[in-house]
Image (spheres, rainbow, N blue to C red):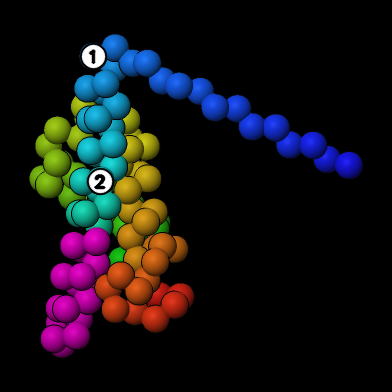
Amino acid sequence: MCTLQGYCFVLDPTLHQQLALASHVGARRFAFNWGLTLVKERREAHAGGEDVEVPWTLPALRREWHRQKHTVAPWWRANSKEAYASGPVSVPGSGGNSRAIGLGPGGP
């Protein structure tokens, strides 16, 4: 017999910690929005006959992020690298909900 027990912890961050938490959450959201926009733009370009690579996988999205981060988010060093790494996880096609950009279940 297996017994599972859960715990609930209440955070009581200082103002400085609240600002840091908000910054990290914002960085994740920025990376998600950036990745989603990139996939949509590349899909449209590909559909229009352009020879572009659509970054369908999480590793491909992360490679693109590392190529572009200095340009699209020059402030990226202000947050944990994991904040940016976790954003693309939810982008459709990278293992997330592919229906969000008009794909059927399972991606491209």
Whether residue 19 is visible to the viewer of this picture, yes or no, is yes
- Amino acid type of disc 1? Leu
Q: Quadrant of residue 64?
A: bottom left
Which type of secondary structure does the marked residue at label 1 adopt?
A: helix
Residue 103 image point, x, y percent: 34, 79
- Amino acid type of disc 2? Arg
Residue 32 image point, x, y percent: 27, 52
As drawn, 1 above or below 45 = above
Residue at 37% in and 45% down: 86
| Circle 2 residue | 29
**Is residue 46 on the magenta stretch?**
yes
Question: Whole-Å distance between the Cαs marked 2 and 1?
Answer: 21 Å
Which type of secondary structure does the marked residue at label 2 adopt?
A: helix
- Mark 2 vs mark 1: which is more N-terminal? 1
Residue 16 image point, x, y percent: 24, 14
Give the prevailing secondary structure in the magenta stretch.
helix
Residue at 20% in and 63% down: 38
Residue at 31% in and 66% down: 55
| Circle 1 residue | 15
Identify the image quadrant of the N terminus: top right
Residue at 25% in and 46% down: 29
In this rendering, the label closer to the viewer, 2 or 1 = 1
How many marks the image carries: the answer is 2
Magenta extent: 36-54
